[in-house]
Image (cartoon, rainbow, N blue to C red):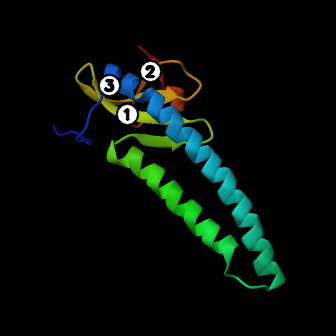
């Protein structure tokens, strides 16, 4: 039987990436906050019927492009960003001969959990 993912991480490979992943998550959080601010400004402009162009829209587009750039870093490595608010990531892996996810959250010091592909966060199991 084939696997759903072409790339599979070991715990050590995932651990090695944690410093960079923490940095990318922090960037995404800051960009998301900036995007919300731009969204409010654009919404106010639309409600007021004012000019829909200018610096506010340019900033919004730039922020969206920056978010896309950071998300591409995850996608290029087949790392799944499950929940930005919790900083929850899933790494495809093989555990006990089965394809699973290594599951990590930004507040956890190490990659200490795994879960079945079809299990949610409640299905996380410690190693």
Numbered tag placed on residue 91 in the rendering: 1
- Can I make out residue 114 in this image? yes
The residue closer to the viewer here, 76 or 91, is: 76
Instruction: First in sequence, mark 3 or 2: give its number.
Output: 3
Inter-mark Cα distance, 2 to 1: 10 Å
Residue 43 occupies which quadrant of the picture?
bottom right
Residue at the image point whose x is 22% and y is 39% from the top: 3
Inter-mark Cα distance, 1 to 3: 10 Å
Near mark 3 (Cα within 10 A), the count class, few <14, some 14-19 or many ≥20, is few
Label 1 element class: strand
Q: Is residue 72 above or below residue 81?
A: below
Report x, y in % for residue 60. Answer: 63, 66
Residue designated by label 3: 13
Report x, y in % for residue 99. Answer: 28, 31
The residue closer to the viewer here, 45 or 112, is: 45
Residue designated by label 2: 111
Label 3 element class: helix
Report x, y in % for residue 53. Answer: 67, 81
Residue at the image point whose x is 52% and y is 55% from the top: 67
Q: Is residue 55 left or right of residue 61?
A: right
Q: Is residue 95 left or right of residue 107?
A: left
Residue 34 occupies which quadrant of the picture?
bottom right
Report x, y in % for residue 56. Answer: 69, 71
Q: Is residue 117 left or right of residue 67?
A: left
Near mark 2 (Cα within 10 A), the count class, few <14, some 14-19 or many ≥20, is some
Instruction: First in sequence, mark 2 or 1: give its number.
Output: 1
Are the residues at dot 3 and dot 2 in contact (C-beta closer than 8 Å)?
Answer: no
Near mark 1 (Cα within 10 A), the count class, few <14, some 14-19 or many ≥20, is many
Tag in front: 3 or 2: 3
């Amino acid at each position: 039987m084939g696997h759903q993912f072409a790339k599979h991480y070991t715990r050590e490979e995932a651990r090695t990436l944690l410093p960079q992943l923490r940095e990318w998550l922090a960037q995404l959080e800051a960009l998301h906050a900036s995007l919300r601010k731009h969204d409010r400004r654009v919404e106010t402009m639309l409600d007021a019927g004012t000019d829909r162009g200018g610096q506010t829209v340019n900033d919004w587009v730039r922020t969206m492009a920056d978010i896309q750039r950071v998300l591409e870093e995850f996608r290029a490595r087949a790392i799944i960003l499950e929940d930005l608010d919790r900083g929850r990531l899933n790494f495809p892996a093989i555990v006990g001969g089965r394809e699973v996810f290594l599951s990590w959250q930004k507040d956890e010091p190490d990659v200490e959990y795994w879960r079945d592909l079809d299990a949610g966060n409640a299905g996380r199991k410690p190693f």
